[in-house]
Structure formats: C-alpha cells, structure tokens
Image (spheres, helix red, strand yellow):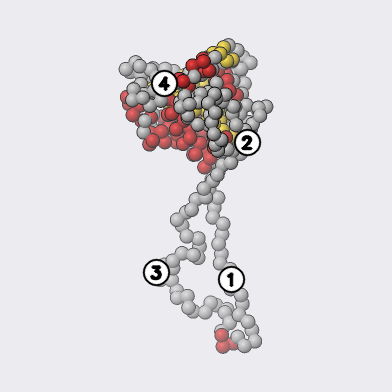
Amino acid sequence: MTRVPTRRRVPRPARASAGLLAVAVLVAGCSGTDAPGTGTPSAGSPPTSAPAPGAVSPDAAGSTPPPPPTPPQSPEPPEPPRPLAGRVVVLDPGHQLGNARFPAEINRGVDAGGFTKACNTTGTASDDGYPEATFAWEVAVELRRQLRRLGARVLLTRDDNAADAWGPCIDERGRLGNPGGPGPTADVRVSIHADGNRASSAHGFHVIRPGRRDGWTDDVLAPSERLAVALRDALVAAGFTPSTYLGVDGIDVRTDLGTLNHSDVPVVMAELGNMRDPRDADVMERAAGRQRYARALGAAIRAFLTG
Ligand SMILES: [Zn+2]
C-alpha cells in the first residue's frame, strides 16, 4: 500500500488511508429475487405432501432404506459486473482545504513541466463560501465509490480535505500512478476542479486536455484527447452545459498545467462548472448535484477504459 507524501506540517493522527486502499470491495448484490426452489410456492402449486415419483413407500421400507434426500439446487448468484476489474484510476481532487493557511508551502516553486510554477493554489469558492477544494473532494469520494463498484482500483492524490493541511503540489499530483513509480501504474488520471470566473455570462463546464510539450505530453496526447471527448460527452449526456466562456464545445487545451504535463498516462482536468455562477453553484452545493457529476465522470471513465 502506498501513501502519497503530502508534506504536511501539522502532525496528524494515524488514520485509515482509504484514499489509497487498493481493494475494491464489492458489495454483492443482495437481489430480491429468490433462488430457484426457495421461494413461496405460487398459487396452484401441487401439494408437497404427496410422495415424490420413485420414492419408496414407508410400507415397503422394511428392507430397502429410503434414498437420501436430494440436496437443494442452489446455484451461485451471478457475479455483479466488474468491467473495470484490474484497472487503476487516479483521481486528483484539486487543491486542499487548508492551503490558504500555508502560503509559504503552496507558493514555493516546483517543476510544472520544464518551467517553474507554484506548488498549488487555494482554489476558488462559490459566493456562498463553498470551497472548490471541498467540492472536488466530495465529487472524488463519490466517484471513487462508483468506480470501486465497477471493480477499479482507485488512488486519490490526497487522503482528506483537512482545514489544517496543505498540498500535495501539482507535480506530485501529476506523477502519482506513472509507470515506473513506487505504486501501481494507472490507466487514467482525472483531475477534478471547478472554475471561479466572475463574468456574469460565464457558465458551464470545460474539460482541459494537455497540449503538446515535447518530452512531456507528446506520449499521452492522443489518448488524453479521447478521454476529454468521453468526459465532455458524458457531462452533456448528464445535462450539464459546456462552458459559455472557455474552450470549444466544452474542451480546452493547455500546456501550462503541471498536473497534466507530469502525467505519463492519459490525463484530463475537469473544470466541472463555474462556482461564481449561481446556476452552477446551486448544483455543486447539493449532494444530489455532486452525485450527478460523479456519475457522469464514472460513465466517461468506464467508456474510455472499455471502449
Ligand atoms: Zn482548481
């Protein structure tokens, strides 16, 4: 089991690292259907007191023992589908709730893909004060639950959303799950964010895929573009509106994002909406809305990995 070093300054008690726990616990579907032969007899069933055909009459049992009862037929219930069994997904919930309390740490420069950029930022918030870090975390946890049910192994780039913690930096978020790293190799990486644009008409989601940076992103450009399309299509199918202010048809291309540049597996960053837009914020602040986002992302990841 691998934990991601987050370089926190505040000592924290040991806790279960559910974020990196690789076991995909599958809750077997306790279906409401009865196994054959175990249900209540339907109306019109023959009485069960009559001797079964071939049974030996008690009157004739003097010398012939009755045959042993036939064990009931109880076929194994069908396995729930696990279309993502054996697949590894990295989810990167953007920012960290405590980042604003650690300006020195998050402002220090890190390699963002051949150039230096701040380790991280504080993220945005809705006008109601709902932080992007919390939104991203809650969507990621719900998405992890859904992906595990499909059999995937899910790694999160941070273990919690603590107000007294910071990090990790963007380079670390971009490298987790890369081939040759200390942990399992990921099949896909999705970074979850929300935007904070104050223009009154700025509304909707956009998916950012990496642009070409030779030696950095050229190895994942094509699959990342396919991943971006899968996310865009799934979000549209779920009723979300492509951005009215960035990108083309809900997809943007950037070369300045360390999380994308460091990834050696297909990667996108999903800006799921504009938190400063009241319509988007209203969806983001509701658990049902976050579940809609997670379902759409899960459908996209499934389509990408199995299509
Ligand atoms: Zn963000």
Residue 166, percent from left and from top: 51, 23
Mark 3 or 4: the one toward you: 4
Residue holding disc 3: 43
The residue singled out by tag 2 in the image is 1
Q: Amino acid at mark 4?
A: Thr
- Foreground mark, 1 or 4, reads 4
According to the picture, the residue beneath numbered tag 4 turns out to be 124
Residue at 55% from the left image edge and 50% from the top image edge? 79
The CA distance from mark 2 to mark 3 is 55 Å
Please tell me which of labels 2 and 3 falls first in the chain: 2
Tell me: is circle 4 under 8 Å from ligand 1.
yes
3D distance between C-alphas at marks 2 and 1:
47 Å
Secondary structure, mark 3, is loop
Disc 2 on helix, strand or loop?
A: loop
Displayed quadrant of residue 116: top right
Asked whether the residues under the numbered discs 2 and 3 touch, taking CB atoms below 8 Å apart as contact, a structural biologist would say: no
Q: For the residue marked with disc 3, what is the amino acid?
A: Ala
Q: Nearer the viewer, residue 177 or 129?
A: 129
Q: CA distance from mark 1 to mark 4?
A: 67 Å
Report how far apart the C-alphas of labels 4 and 2 lie in the structure: 32 Å
Q: Residue at x 57, y 15 (%)?
A: 110
The answer to which of marks 1 and 4 sits earlier in the sequence is 1
> Residue at label 1?
70
Give, as a three-letter code, the residue at label 1: Thr
Q: Quadrant of residue 3?
A: top right
x and y, in percent, of residue 49 in the image: 48, 78
In the picture, the quarter occupied by the N terminus is top right
* Residue closest to the eye, 272 or 136: 136
